[in-house]
């Protein structure tokens, strides 16, 4: 590993010379790297699949290896999960690992001096303020949240200071050393700038663990849900089934129920290709049958989120809990409706916005930009206690300028 890190330092020095950076592998991983900061550095993509060659990915030309006459003009980053096979292929072409090419995994390795810089940032920002390194608080209002932002301002300063360091890295992709509670071990999380304008990482959407594949908010939610229900004969339902989050929760809560929204042509509870379909506005579960309903960034994509909250309330047992994350606008009280659905027609009140969808490359339409009034809505539905959980951790890489999740107890 140390040898690889030394080679990586040398590679990054070479990236600053006149050799052209190319990506080898033209799949989703390649697209994410281009979106995440490499777009301005890369003009060419190489792929072994003849169907992908001659195509364009993010305005970048895709070519086959047969079309390359001078491999020495390139620094190659392998953006494919088949990096071992491609590494062997490049070695047969006479290229040297760590000198001429590197896999996306090795590129994420932290050079020793980079880790020291990160540790130094932490020491400087949190000097005399160790309490701000690990935050877990219940918040019941916007004003209370604003007070915590003042109290824990060093956590926000820490993320902004890290950003200044990360901005200097080629492609703005770097690793963050920490501890993954989901995997139960230390790791180098990857940080990128996908879903942003490039000025700051979308912290809650990044800090990915290379082993479980979960980002910051996913890892926190997995731990929050499993800590409440692991080892208990509880009935837990989560609104996803084909994701890394569900896979990891299934390991911790074997009897967990998962689902996906597969379209309006199916009835809730139907099984299609081993995947359960559920419409959160019309769940198939009996009244008072679930101990927990959980979701990660789902309700902003629901035409009538109030109806979805009522459905969760109906299905929960007494003292059952609704636990969910949403991309909330933390400086606003009032939610904004972006899109409405009437008479089977979509009407855009604001320009349409789409988020990633694990079962559709088209993404999911955003109906609501949530504000803090979502807490009042949940109380109106009937929940006895409603609050936001504010969290942050230097050690675990829980980031996002004091991110929150919502919990509501029936």
Image (cartoon, rainbow, N blue to C red):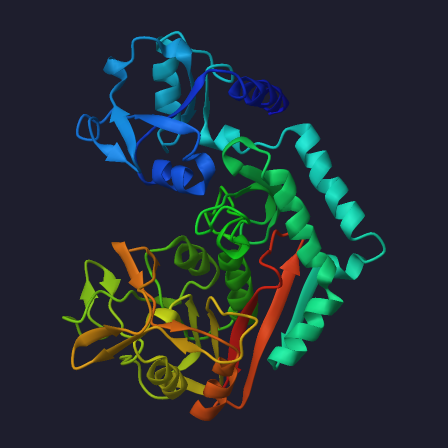
Q: Where is residue 76 in the image (x, y as percent from the top left)?
A: 42, 21
Q: Can residue 360 be seen in this view?
A: no
The N terminus sits in image quarter: top right
Q: What residue is at 39 percent from the left and 7 percent from the top?
A: 94
Name the side, left or right, on which 384 lies relative to 90: right
Q: What residue is at 27 percent from the left and 17 percent from the top?
A: 65
Vertically, is 325 above or below 399? below
Name the side, left or right, on which 313 lies relative to 231: left
Q: Of all residues shown, which one is farthest toward the right?
A: 128
Name the residue nearer the viewer: 193 or 233.
193
Q: What residue is at 67 percent from the left and 78 percent from the top?
A: 144
Q: Of all residues shown, which one is farthest toward the left?
A: 265
Q: Position of residue 188 (x, y in %)?
A: 58, 40
Q: Where is residue 168 in the image (x, y as percent from the top left)?
A: 60, 34
Q: What residue is at 40 percent from the left and 59 percent from the top?
A: 246
Name the residue nearer the viewer: 110 or 165.
165
Name the side, left or right, on which 105 lies relative to 146: left
Vertically, is 310 above or below 353? below
Name the residue nearer the viewer: 1 or 361.
361
């Amino acid at each position: 590993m140390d040898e690889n890190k030394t080679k990586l330092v040398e590679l990054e020095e070479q990236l600053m010379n006149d050799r052209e950076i190319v990506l080898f592998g033209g799949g989703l991983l390649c697209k994410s790297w281009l979106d995440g900061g490499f777009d301005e550095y890369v003009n060419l993509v190489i792929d072994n699949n003849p169907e992908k060659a001659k195509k364009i990915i993010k305005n970048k030309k895709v070519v086959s290896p047969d079309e390359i006459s001078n491999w020495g003009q390139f620094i190659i980053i392998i953006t494919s999960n088949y990096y071992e096979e491609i590494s062997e292929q490049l070695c047969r072409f006479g290229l040297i690992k760590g000198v001429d090419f590197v896999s996306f995994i090795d590129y994420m390795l932290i050079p020793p001096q980079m880790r020291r810089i990160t540790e130094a940032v932490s020491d400087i920002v949190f000097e005399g303020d160790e309490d701000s390194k690990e935050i877990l608080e219940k918040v019941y209002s916007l004003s209370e949240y604003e007070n915590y932002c003042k109290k824990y301002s060093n956590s926000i300063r820490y993320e902004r200071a890290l950003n200044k360091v990360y901005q200097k890295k080629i492609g703005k992709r770097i690793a963050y050393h920490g501890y993954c509670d989901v995997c139960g071990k230390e790791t180098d999380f990857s940080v990128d700038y996908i879903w942003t304008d490039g000025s700051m990482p979308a912290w809650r959407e990044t800090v990915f663990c290379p082993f479980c594949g979960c980002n910051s908010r996913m890892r926190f939610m997995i731990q929050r849900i499993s800590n409440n229900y692991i080892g208990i004969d509880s009935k837990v339902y989560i609104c996803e089934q084909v994701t890394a989050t569900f896979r990891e929760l299934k390991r911790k809560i074997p009897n967990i129920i998962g689902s996906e929204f597969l379209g309006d042509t199916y009835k809730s509870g139907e099984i299609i290709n081993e995947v359960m379909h559920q419409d959160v506005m019309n769940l198939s579960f009996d009244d008072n049958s679930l101990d927990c309903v959980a979701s990660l960034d789902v309700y902003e994509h629901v035409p009538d989120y109030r109806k979805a909250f009522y459905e969760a309330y109906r299905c929960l047992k007494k003292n059952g809990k609704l636990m969910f994350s949403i991309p909330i606008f933390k400086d606003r009280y009032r939610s904004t409706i972006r899109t409405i659905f009437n008479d089977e027609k979509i009407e855009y009140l604001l320009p349409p916005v789409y988020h990633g969808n694990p079962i559709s490359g088209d993404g999911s339409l955003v109906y609501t930009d949530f504000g803090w009034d979502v807490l009042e809505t949940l109380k109106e539905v009937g929940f006895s206690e409603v609050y936001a959980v504010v969290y942050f951790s230097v050690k675990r890489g829980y980031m996002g300028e004091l991110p929150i999740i919502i919990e509501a107890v029936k």
